[in-house]
Amino acid sequence: MSFDPTYPFQLKNLPPDTIIKNSDFGELLLNARIELAELKGSCGQIPNPLLLTAPLLLRESVESSGIENINTTVANVLENQLLPEAEQNKPDKEVLQYREALFWGNKNLKELSLSNRLILGIHKLLISDNGGFYRREQNHIVNSKTGEILYTPPIQADINRLIGDWENYVNDNKDLDPLIRAAIAHQQFESIHPFKDGNGRTGRIMMVLQLVKDQVLEYPILFISGYINKNRSEYYKLLREVTSDNNWHNYIEFMLQGFYVQAQETKATLKKVTYLHMELKDEIKTNHSKIYSADLLEALFSFAVITPTRLASELKIHYTTASKYLLQLANAQILQSVKAGRNHFFVNKKLVSLLSK
């Protein structure tokens, strides 16, 4: 039966009917694995990798949300995370929810594996209003400009069965390289389209967590969303061609190229962040030894935009002392002082600049 985008798609179980072999992708697969191995090795060689990779996760959050037309900047999100939730802008709040969901998923991956519970837990954090439940009605993917129906996901009664099959595939199937399996699993998840909203963001989190589970990565810091965002039209076209024409090969090639490109970029950015951490440590320790502490340095990386109130809380010092520290660093041009309404922010401008590129 030919593909009809207006009719609920009868999605088959994994693995795909098409014969897919590692050898089909030769040098492209090899190059992607080499870059990812080097990225994983880079994380293992830096001090305090959780601290230095945390800013990179924020950039992934901004890029992934941008694919869903939730548009903001790294700088805006860094400011908004310091404000009470009621005062946060909606796009920035949604990016922060993405980051929280990614952190939570990584933290619970070992216990829950790639499972129904992990998917629903991630979605609940992503979608603050009624998240954490599979859709109860039929939905469609439509062209936002023309209203044309591009794809109708399987009926809601099939979701639990299809998710169960997806679980079996990502946890048990070892015939293919992990990168190819991650690409296949991602296309299947997006085809199931199990939620009313947040399918793309949930699917991209699950994809990078699959690479962590399969020990391709140590931390979920691969910015695949950056690559997808730059090639959004091609990404959606290739997803649809798998559904309509069973064209797995071109889609998998696209994803392998994305893994390769983004591993290179992430590795370069991590190197710059690590160097900046060392540079600021030396500068503060040498020229501002009276206020230097490892906790202060950590706070300036955990919160690339920070307020005296937040620094006081992080270092467990008085607000006045925290203000004095930040003003001293601003006067030395290590930080940038920015006033916005009643808020006084201090910006680690070199780190924000790195994350914004």
Image (tube, helix red, strand yellow):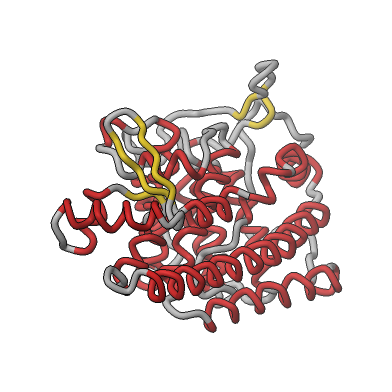
Question: Residue 18 at x, y = what percent?
Answer: 78, 59
Going by the picture, which residue comes out furthest to the top? 146
Is residue 264 visible in the rendered structure shown here?
Answer: yes
Q: Is residue 319 left or right of residue 272?
A: left
Occupied quadrant, residue 339: top left
Is residue 162 visible in the rendered structure shown here?
Answer: no
Q: Nearer the viewer, residue 57 or 312?
A: 312
Q: Nearer the viewer, residue 262 or 339?
A: 339
Q: Is residue 301 left or right of residue 33?
A: left
Question: Residue 349 at x, y = what percent?
Answer: 50, 51
Looking at the image, is 280 positioned above or below residue 184? below
Going by the picture, which residue comes out furthest to the left? 318
| x 66%, y 78%: residue | 38
**Total numbered labels:** 0
Looking at the image, is 38 positioned above or below residue 143? below
Question: Residue 78 at x, y = what percent?
Answer: 41, 45
| x 69%, y 74%: residue | 177
